Image (spheres, coloured by chain):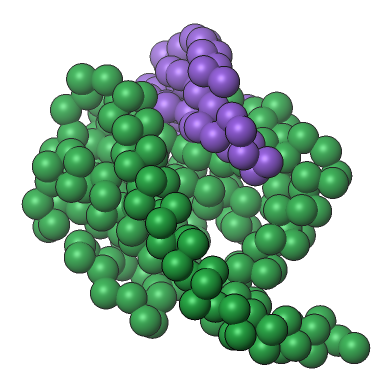
Chain colours: A purple, B green
């Protein structure tokens, strides 16, 4: 599937667990709009690889 | 017995105990809204938000709670939904969309939330690209999704969706995808 958010032009700032005691076990990710262009000659002009996984569970 | 017949029989059963369940959910909902709003404010930090869209806003309860917490007037809050709930009144701008193409201008939103929506999406990549289009250059996207780590958890979530949308409520316009659930690492959005 690849990194969906980065492929769509986002950089991930932070991820937290939102319901650590819930069997659904969801998480929440904050992303910023990265400077990326799409098209036949798509070129990533600026994208951060910062992926600080800050689990609070 | 077909699935539809099973859903009808289960609906009859739930009708008998609906008041007790509704009452239990109502108490939990208020706590859940406050918890979710607190998490949104925490994760945003001091990010200034003047206009906000909730993609896949469902019944609009969380959307409204976030808008209020961010002190936004209702014309600065938009909810997008594939299936607008016929029995709900939305206290903000509500727009129907096809699950991909977003009827909002480029660079127009400071904050977009996508809460437990991706597992319903037929084209998650296309939807994310549309969200990027409508976000302002310094805009933020908050995605909330389940971390279904194995086949049992994936099946559990699908069954719960079927129960919610086809048995307990009549929101059968909400798309439920049998292959919609993934683990955090499979999504690669965390």
Residue B99 higher or lower than B6, as above or below: above
Left or right of B159, for residue B114: left
- Where does the image place residue B39, in percent across and percent down from the top left? 37, 31
- Where does the image place residue B183, in percent across and percent down from the top left? 72, 35
Q: Name the quadrant containing residue B167.
A: bottom right
Left or right of B58, for residue B135: left
Residue lying farthest front? B20
Left or right of B94, for residue B99: right
Residue B130 in sight here: no
Foreground of the two, A9 or B164:
B164
Residue B6 higher or lower than A19, as above or below: below
Left or right of A49, for residue B95: left
Residue B20 in sight here: yes
Residue B156 higher or lower than A6, as above or below: below
Q: Name the quadrant containing residue B61.
A: bottom left
Please state the total of marks drawn on the protein image: 0
Residue at 41%, 75% (x, y): give it.
Answer: B85
Quadrant of the drawing holding the N terminus of chain A: top right
Residue lying farthest right? B1
Residue at 46%, 46% (x, y): give it.
Answer: B115
Residue B100 higher or lower than A50, as above or below: below
- Where does the image place residue B97, in percent across and percent down from the top left? 41, 66
Residue at 48%, 29% (x, y): give it.
Answer: A29
Foreground of the two, B106 or B69:
B69
- Where does the image place residue A8, in percent across and percent down from the top left? 51, 34
Quadrant of the drawing holding the C terminus of chain A: top right
């Amino acid at each position: 599937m690849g990194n969906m958010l980065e492929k769509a032009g986002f950089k991930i700032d932070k991820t937290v667990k939102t319901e650590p005691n819930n069997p659904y076990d969801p998480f929440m990710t904050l992303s910023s709009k990265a400077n990326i262009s799409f098209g036949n000659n798509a070129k990533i002009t600026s994208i951060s690889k910062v992926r600080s996984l800050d689990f609070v569970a | 017995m077909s699935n539809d017949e099973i859903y009808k029989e289960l609906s009859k059963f739930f009708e008998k105990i609906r008041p007790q369940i509704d009452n239990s959910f109502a108490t939990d909902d208020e706590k859940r809204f406050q918890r979710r709003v607190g998490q949104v404010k925490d994760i945003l930090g001091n990010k200034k938000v003047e206009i906000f869209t909730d993609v896949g806003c469902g019944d609009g309860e969380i959307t409204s709670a976030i808008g209020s917490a961010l002190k936004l007037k209702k014309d600065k809050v938009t909810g997008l939904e594939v299936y607008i709930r016929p029995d709900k009144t939305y206290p903000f701008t509500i727009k129907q969309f096809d699950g991909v193409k977003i009827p909002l201008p480029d660079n127009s939103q400071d904050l977009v939330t996508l809460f437990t929506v991706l597992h319903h999406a037929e084209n998650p990549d296309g939807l994310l690209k549309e969200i990027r289009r409508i976000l302002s250059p310094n805009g933020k996207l908050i995605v909330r999704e389940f971390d279904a780590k194995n086949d049992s958890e994936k099946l559990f979530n699908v069954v719960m969706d079927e129960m919610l949308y086809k048995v307990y409520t009549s929101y059968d316009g909400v798309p439920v995808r049998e292959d919609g659930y993934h683990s955090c690492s499979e999504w690669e959005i965390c």
